[in-house]
Image: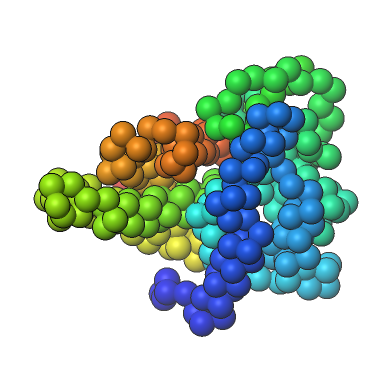
Amino acid sequence: MDFQPTQDQRDLRAGVRDLLAGRYDREALRASVDGAAATGRSVDRALWRELGEAGFFALRLPEDEGGVGLGLPEAVLVFEEAGRALLPGPLVATHLAAGLVAGAAEGEAVVTAFDLEGPLVTHLGEADAVLGADGEPVEVYAGEPVRSADPLTPLARVSVPARPVAAGRYRDEGALLTAALQLGSALRTVELAVSYAKDREQFGQPIGAFQAVKHLCAQMLVRAEVARTAVYAAAVTADPAEVAGAKLLADEAAVRNARDCLQVHGGMGFTWEADVHLHLKRAWVRAEQWRTAAQAEEALAAELLAGAE
């Protein structure tokens, strides 16, 4: 079984990276943070429609239904790039809603989901539809804003009762695509740490020459590559246990890499001007979406027990 991307898949990833570099660079990211602080909203509707036109949301929708007709491996590569750019918004839910909610595939609708435990919903104030635990649209009548760790992921507590976490393909696909977002962030923080270690000098030489910094960057790379292997493999097999393992490893890579990147940056990493804290805050939120670490561990343990019987 070959887990290496084909040339077409690499071209797809490069195209998405170019699109996001042109439309959502660092200046746009910072503008989003400022805008969210003022309005409580972080989705750029014009960019959302551009993503729809590029096939981001309809990527796995069959061609006879107006989609691109690709599969999970291609979706994982696309979401990896979105995670790398810290693109905000309920990307996973809108992607899963293609063909189910009018306008989702084209980027005309923003769709969020009950992807957190309990009655919390992300991006409720800017969503046109909400998916329930079973993947079907549900009505939500009101929401009370809740402080979020990530300035670009607004949270609301809704008035509908908490729903049980649904298992199955819908939840697995949401977890895998979220793992791909985490993977992109983990890889990006490796780049940020290495770049800073090369440029920042102390005692007359780049800090990257010091053994402690080398070790931090090496550990970051190992975490990201292990997570990449797991995410790519799960995209090919779609095995629930492998999806659980991929989410577990990608969450760890995103959170720990952001922390280590912050440490490489030293005092600069703690300032608002650095982007490191945005990766860490987004990673914290994503780690609670679709499948938490505890849920992934339970799924893996159940699979191991079933195999031992």
Please provide percent x and percent y for residue 7. Answer: 51, 82
Please provide percent x and percent y for residue 258. Answer: 38, 42
In this view, the residue farthest toward the bottom is 7
Q: Is residue 100 visible?
A: no
Answer left or right for 241 relative to 111. Answer: left
Position of residue 27 relative to residue 296, above or below, is below
Q: Nearer the viewer, residue 269 or 250?
A: 269
Q: Nearer the viewer, residue 34 or 103?
A: 34
Answer left or right for 224 relative to 125. Answer: left
Task: Give me the residue at 14% from left, 52% from top.
Answer: 204
Position of residue 252 relative to residue 56, above or below, is above
Task: Give me the residue at 61% from left, 37% from top.
Answer: 33
User: Quadrant location of the C terminus?
Assistant: top left
Q: Is residue 106 visible?
A: yes
Answer left or right for 88 relative to 207. Answer: right
Please provide percent x and percent y for residue 201. Answer: 22, 50
In this view, the residue farthest toward the front is 204
Q: Nearer the viewer, residue 247 or 251?
A: 251
Numbered marks: total = 0
- What coloring was used for the rendering? rainbow
Within the image, what quadrant is residue 254 found in? top left
Answer left or right for 247 relative to 161. Answer: left
Please provide percent x and percent y for residue 224. Answer: 35, 54
Task: Give me the residue at 31% from left, 34% from top.
Answer: 267
Within the image, what quadrant is residue 126 found in? top right
User: Quadrant location of the N terminus?
Assistant: bottom left
Task: Give me the residue at 75% from left, 53% from top.
Answer: 48
Q: Nearer the viewer, residue 125 or 33?
A: 33
